[in-house]
Image (cartoon, helix red, strand yellow):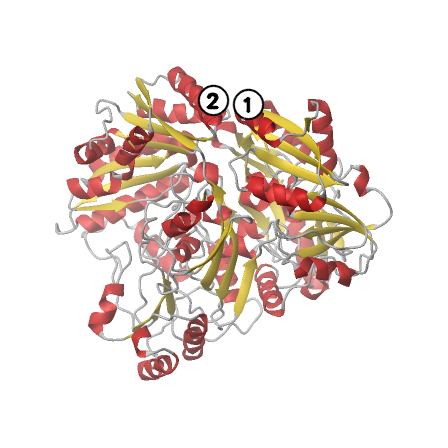
Amino acid sequence: MNDATSVDSAPGIKEPDFSGIDRAALFAELARVLPADCLLIEHEDIKPYECDGLSAYRELPLAVALPREEAQVAAVLKICRKLGVPVVARGAGTGLSAGALPHKFGVILSLARFNRILKVDPAARLAVVQPGVRNLAISEAAAPFGLYYAPDPSSQIACTIGGNVAENSGGVHCLKYGLTVHNLIALRILTIDGELLELGSRAPDTPGFELLALFTGSEGLLGVVTEVTVKLTPKPQLAQCVLAAFDDVVKAGDAVAKIIAAGIIPAGLEMMDQPATAAVEQFVRAGYPLDAKAILLVEADGTPEEVAEEIAAVRKVLDGAGATEIRVSRDENERLKFWAGRKAAFPAAGRISPDYYCMDGTIPRRRLGEMLEAITQMEHKYGLRCINVFHAGDGNLHPLILFDANKPGELERTEEFGAEILELSVRLGGTITGEHGVGFEKINSMCVQFASPELTMFHRVKQAFDPAGLLNPGKAVPTLHRCAEFGRMHVHHGQLPHPDLPRF
Amino acid sequence: MNQLTQYYADTLRAAARGGGKVVPRGGGSKDFYGRATVGEILSLADYRGIINYDPTELVLTARAGTPLAEIEALLAEQNQCLAFEPPHFGSGATLGGAVAAGLSGPRRMQTGPLRDFVLGTKIMDGRGDILKFGGEVMKNVAGFDVSRLLAGSLGSFSLILEVSVKVLPRPPYEATLRMAVPEAEALARLNSWGGQPLPLAASAWYDGQLTLRLAGAHAAVDAACSKLGGSRLEADAASAFWNSVREQQDAFFGGGEALWRLAVPTTAAPLSVPGRQFIEWGGGLRWWKSDAPASVIRSAAQAVGGNATLFRGGDRRDERFTPLPLAQLRLHQGLKKAFDPNNVFDASRLYAELA
């Protein structure tokens, strides 16, 4: 855990060993700076923090800190820095990549109590909020001024803005309104040394490097957010949705390309394959055509004039692209009904199967047909079913692999299935994660996405913020040692006599 | 191209051995920007060419030395554009140079700044190693966002070799309105309009005249025109005007005084600085032609939560950008060292203290 001594020694080769931590000293020091109700160390108290939204991975931390004041956060960080203890920051714990999975020898730093909206400034179109504020609460606070916070991850009723910053969260409206990084104005962060930094500013440009962008999506590896200033967007007067059915998934994919080629950037552009449609239809009865091989949802928003113009243009493109059926929402109820099916995809998967595993690869849209065909083959190979929902506008695919964790070997087969999808995403020119983050879940897939020089550079960037490597260690960026192990396992994959053996 | 990258790597390694500095340069159109450079110019003008462009994926990838004009002409054929409207400031402007300078044009407040459009990069670090970050897809959260970190870095820690940018369809329809409004009233109106669903795509205020550009669906633009009032400019005149703002060819930008660029919150009240002023970006960008001392102009910007850059004129040995707080500076130095441990890239163009 020594700080790098030479100028160009490469960090991130091996994971540091934190097992020698002095627990008694840690608890004593934390108790000195935190009131009793802000520090949890008993097993039954820390148990709820053992996992985030991806419950397949669980670990108990040494302690959970629940500070109320920024100064307490700084004090916790300084203690951990001094004692060499890992720190895992946590918002609502809704993440899907085990990014907030506790470290066995670390402290969970929960920002849940930082839940105040400090300011909504309608003239400047911004809100200043604490990191534990829920995503949807910002839009609710801005609604009286005709404004809202645009990024809308599916967990928006529960997920926190601090978590959104850590993951650079997306949603169904990213193509037109951007990801979290496009809707941030400024961040107040604490470094591992407990030092405050302001990244970005209310001015449209900030001097120096683009640290705000670098920090966004850094998965708790660079610092801890204590305040977020977000951009608010004027609420569109009207939204209208088109539902189109296709007798072939490739035709549906081509229709998406044709919409873009026609110069249209819809507010939402989603695709579902037939198994996904069938699954949600049993569940919410959205009225989706069950004989369609794929359906598209295309949403237009804006002034009534803009929406009318865009819907007409979309209709024309869909007609030309061979849609077998086109419906345009006649009122808000019908629009919400169209969306109800798409939004119920995850719970529907949970209803038709004991467990499901959501993947998050992004691919160039033109490769969709190849990807779906490959997934069908993988279903046979692994003996598991998969339903596909797709943020088609930006190429972000969410295959939901259905499995039963109680059946021996199914979880392992599912993970291998998922990893193969991610490897194919990379080969098709895409990425292993579009919006859920790498976390612990996809740490091995990072070895497929990036070569050693890039991974080493990520470790160097981290080192500039966190020289001792204490912030969320073992997540997001694999060590070279880990990639070497993973690569070796891959070479022998398929020849292993016991495919259900644990990987590490 | 491999020969060129080999040459770049050799140059960087030679500089590391000899203790020299390297200054990456595209077309040289923004040579005026930042502090005076120190070191050997490394030209990327020959490292050019569009590598991939698929209009339906909304992505273009090109080598750093590719002229912006070439890229924009190709995009125009497909009715697409670089929505952040990077200023060229000269016929040789390149994509790599635009990213290194990080400057956005009149449409910035509607579409976002240049950095928002950078999806991926291939760079050469100070060791001479080639690294790839990001990619050609819109949504990608694998690894730290090094690509966006390069926007505005002025060649201070890496050589940009390739860039993938998000492109957008050109707005189907545009209109430009002009009205006589005093400064304070113009700022108030711009902030109020900014909070409404109006297709505002640029604003400029100078000498009591407010000019607005609206862009979007035909019907929406027409509806906004009737709502906002003022007189409508002819299409040719409008296009010439916005180009003169983007390229700083408007009469305002002439004259002998220094040109200061003040980025401030859009809601900041009128600033009191000696000289002439031109306001863009809904009030967020305030250009001043002024010979007032730097301290006077910097404190005017900082008093309202903004920052001031000495953009053109003045002494190139002075600080041009607003100095960083100490904690920020240390972090900048740490990042610079991560990419450029031997300090071969001239960072003094950004800050003397970073060199």
Mark 2 = which residue?
A309
Residue A254 visible in the displayed image: yes
In the picture, measured across the screen, residue B200 lies left or right of residue A372, that is right
Residue count near mark 2 (Cα–Cα under 10 Å), binned few <14, some 14–19, many ≥20? some
Residue A121 in the image, given as x and y percentages of width and height: 51, 52
Which secondary structure lies at badge 2? helix
Disc 2: host chain: A
A431 or A268, which lies in front?
A: A268
Q: Position of residue A173 (x, y in %)?
A: 41, 38
- Quarter of the rendering containing residue A63: bottom left
Q: Residue at x 60, y 68 (%)?
A: B330
Q: Amino acid at mark 1?
A: His
- Residue B218 is marked as 1
Q: Amino acid at mark 2?
A: Glu
Q: Is residue A462 left or right of residue A103?
A: right
Quadrant where the N terminus of chain A sits is bottom left
Q: Residues within 10 Å of mark 1 (few under 14, many from 20)?
A: some
Residue toward you, A306 or A474: A306
